[in-house]
Image: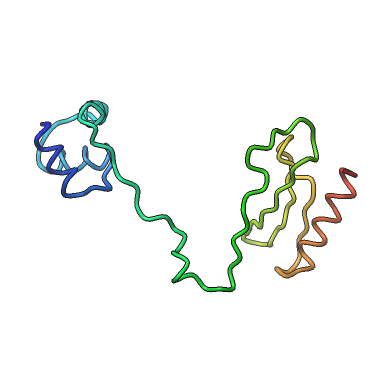
């Protein structure tokens, strides 16, 4: 079985233990996914990650600005220290919400057309609710 697992891993380097198990079952073997996972771990047969979604700088349009994560490593000790924004598409509306990362609650939202006024309206709702 180790030989078959090795052959599958060499042929398909992005396959994890579940896909390897499926490939073995297609070949007619009766195997358990946990056993395949254990054998792959013992043989150091880890699946390689595919290329990240972000395109390399040469192929990326210049209109996109990539900003570094300024809150990485910051320890939150109280509410209203870090806010995050997210646009969620609902079947009947578009929503913009400001979330408090400490309490993980939606503190501001707006239902409007998807443009600049949506973000401003949601921010005003959040500022009125929390008064940071």
Q: Report the number of numbered marks.
A: 0
Q: Quadrant of the C terminus?
A: top right
Residue 72 vertical position relative to residue 92 in the rendered view, above or below: above
Residue 98 vertical position relative to residue 62 in the rendered view, above or below: above
Give the image location of residue 91, x and y in percent.
62, 60
Horizontally, residue 130 falls left or right of residue 24, namely right
Figure quadrant of residue 44? top left
Figure quadrant of residue 19? top left
Residue at 28 percent across and 38 percent down: it is 46
Give the image location of residue 53, x and y in percent.
44, 58
Horizontally, residue 7 falls left or right of residue 59, namely left
Q: 63 and 109: which one is in front? A: 63
Horizontally, residue 124 falls left or right of residue 39, namely right
Residue at 42 percent across and 55 percent down: it is 52
Figure quadrant of residue 103? top right
Give the image location of residue 22, x and y in percent.
21, 41
Horizontally, residue 35 falls left or right of residue 60, namely left
Q: 57 and 42: which one is in front? A: 57
Residue at 76 percent across and 30 percent down: it is 77
Give the image location of residue 5, x and y in percent.
15, 37
């Amino acid at each position: 079985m180790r030989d078959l697992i090795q052959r599958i891993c060499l042929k398909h380097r992005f396959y994890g233990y579940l896909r390897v198990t499926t490939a073995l079952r297609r070949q007619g073997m009766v195997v358990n996914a946990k056993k395949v996972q254990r054998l792959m771990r013992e043989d150091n047969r880890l699946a390689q990650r595919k290329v990240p979604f972000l395109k390399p700088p040469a192929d990326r349009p210049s209109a996109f600005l990539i900003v570094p994560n300024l809150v990485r490593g910051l320890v939150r000790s109280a509410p209203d220290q870090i806010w995050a924004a997210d646009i969620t598409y609902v079947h009947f509306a578009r929503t913009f919400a400001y979330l408090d990362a400490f309490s993980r609650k939606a503190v501001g939202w707006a239902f409007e057309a998807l443009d600049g006024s949506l973000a401003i309206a949601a921010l005003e709702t959040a500022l009125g609710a929390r008064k940071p």
